[in-house]
Image (cartoon, helix red, strand yellow):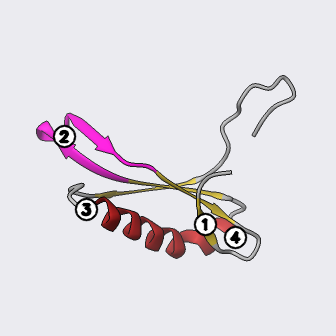
Amino acid sequence: MRLKDRSLDAGRYFLVRYRSDFHDISRDRANSAALAELVCHAADSAGVNQILIRPTRTSFGGFVSTSLKFAFTVDSARRCTEGAK
C-alpha cells in the first residue's frame, strides 16, 4: 500500500512456512501453489489479499535459516494466482 507521501506501509498477508530440503525447486513451487489453494478461502474470508509462502531449510543446528519466497494474490473469486500486486 502506498501512502500519500509515497512511503511504503506494510499490508496484511497470510504467512505460511514449511520445511524443505531445496533439492527440487519445481516441487517447492508446486507445494507452495497447493498450500495457497488450501488457505485461499480463509484468506479471502479474513479480508487478506496476499499469501506469502516460504519453504525454509535450517542448517547449523538451527542457527541459520534459508528460505524461498512465493507470493500469491487472492482475487475476488477466491482464487489464488502467483505473483504479488
Report, in whole angstroms, how far the alpha carbon at label 3 lies from the one at label 1: 21 Å
Image-quadrant location for residue 49: bottom right
For marks 2 and 3, the one nearer the N-term is 3
List x then y, in percent, for residue 46. 68, 64
| Label 3 residue SS | loop
Q: Which residue is mark 1?
A: 81
Q: Quadrant of the N terminus?
A: top right
Q: Look at 38% across and 69% down and name the residue there.
A: 31
* C-alpha gap between disc 4 and disc 1: 17 Å
Task: Check contact, mark 3 vs mark 4: CB within 8 A.
Answer: no
Q: Mark 2 or mark 1, which is nearer the start of the sequence?
A: 2
Task: Please provide the residue range marked out in magenta.
Answer: 55-69
Q: Which residue is mark 3?
A: 24
In the rendered structure, which amino acid carries the disc numbered 1?
A: Thr
Q: Which residue is mark 4?
A: 45
Looking at marks 3 and 4 on the same chain, the residue that comes earlier in the sequence is marked by 3
Q: How far is disc 3 from disc 4 in space, using C-alphas?
A: 32 Å
Q: Is residue 60 left or right of residue 36?
A: left
